[in-house]
Image (cartoon, rainbow, N blue to C red):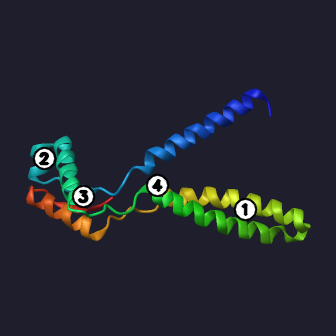
Amino acid sequence: MAIGESAKARGTFVTWLLMTSLVACAGPEPLLRANAKYQLQGKEAAKFDVAACEQKAQAAGLKPGTNRGGNVGAGGAIGLVGGAAVGASSGIVGGPTGIAIGAGVGAVLGLTIGMVGGAYRPLEPDPPYADAVVRCLIEKGYDVSGWQ
């Protein structure tokens, strides 16, 4: 591998790591309908009201639920184990070397596919937390149509 290729590979990995860490923090958020309150306050003020209701629910001891980081980790772990098993069974024809190579390649592919799948898994808030946030937003005059 040439020096330029190594730097390019490192740059690609750093970019991937940065993108993964940015989406890892994202949690489920309530979807607000554009009712009179929302239109009067505007999008930015509505975001502050949502944040205030979320903090109120967390202060009461309720947990938000799933986030992208947890989904990516779980998907990656399942993909790693499953990919290694499938790869090892595919490499049986090549003997011990084939098993080792198959397990390695399968683990890498399974990890990658599992992480991507986990990143796109829908986020679902913990039901008591979601109820508390929705109740708070309704008291403030908003209409909540679900979570994203």
State the CA–CA distance, disc 3 to disc 2.
27 Å
Q: Depth-wise, is mark 3 or mark 2 nearer the camera? A: 3
Q: In front: mark 1 or mark 4?
A: 4
- The disc, 1 or 4, on the residue closer to the chain's N-terminal end is 4
Q: Nearer the viewer, mark 2 or mark 1?
A: 1
- Give the residue at mark 4: 69
Q: Earlier in the sequence, mark 2 or mark 1?
A: 2
**Does 78 sit above or below residue 58?**
below
**52 lies above or below 114:** above
How far is mark 1 from mark 3, CA to CA?
A: 41 Å
Please name the residue that numbered disc 3 is placed on.
58
Q: Say what secondary structure mark 2 lies in.
A: helix
Please tell me the numbered disc located at residue 121.
none
Query: Residue under circle 1?
Result: 106
Residue that appears at 72% across and 33% down: 6
Residue 93, position as x, y percentages in the image: 89, 70
Indicate the secondary structure of the residue bearing disc 4. helix
Question: Cα distance, mark 1 to mark 4?
Answer: 23 Å
